[in-house]
Image (cartoon, helix red, strand yellow):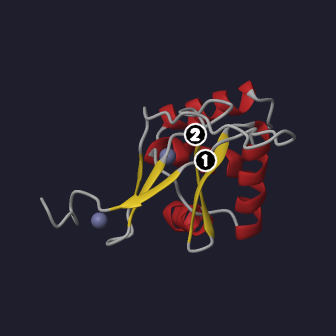
Amino acid sequence: MGTALKRKAKKLLSSVKLRRTNPRVAVLGLLLAVDKPLTQDQISTRLGRNAPDKVTIYRTLESFVRAGLVHRAFLQERVWHFELADDCTEQQCHPHFTCTSCGDTHCFTGVTMPMARSPEKGFVIGHQRVQLEGFCPKCNPNL
Ligand SMILES: [Zn+2]
Ligand SMILES: [Zn+2]
């Protein structure tokens, strides 16, 4: 990992008062570098030889989620994909689009959906997470 990324990761950790441990810097630096949602396994694979063990990666991600640095972006085949929360507001993250043909998921950053309204009294909608499906340009039969 480049020193600029490391510095950025450390700065982010300090900004939310998390201790700058090596696994945290490594995982956050990776998420900063790839700029797309990754699963725990993908994080482990990409960090390669120096990857922290699975439990540490899990705990690291949990601490980021609690601190609001990282969000669970979407669920695919029952596995969560994590990404930086810097494109999100408190109420919603950008929508994610999954191609039903090739399975690729894309971040639709810059797209905001109208917030759903409670159908009846008593429900409080605190967060909206939108997942879209269809064909990507590669798989679109009409292109
Ligand atoms: Zn596709
Ligand atoms: Zn995303």
Q: Amino acid at mark 1?
A: Arg
Q: CA distance from mark 1 to mark 2?
A: 6 Å
* 13 or 6: nearer the viewer: 13
For residue 54, what is the image quadrant? bottom right
The x, y position of residue 133, in whole percent, is 42, 60
Apparent side of residue 52 relative to residue 67 in the rendered image (left or right): left
Mark 1 — residue? 129
* 57 or 101: nearer the viewer: 101
Mark 2 — residue? 93
Apparent side of residue 83 relative to residue 102 in the rendered image (left or right): right
State the SS at label 1.
loop
* Residue at point 46%, 44% (across, down): 35
Q: Residues within 10 Å of mark 1 (few under 14, many from 20)?
A: some
* Residue at point 35%, 62% (across, down): 134
Residue found farthest to the front: 120
Q: Which badge, 1 or 2, is on the more N-terminal residue?
A: 2
Q: Quadrant of ligand 1?
A: bottom left
For residue 138, what is the image quadrant? bottom left
* Residue at point 56%, 37% (across, down): 6
- Name the disc covering residue 108, or none: none
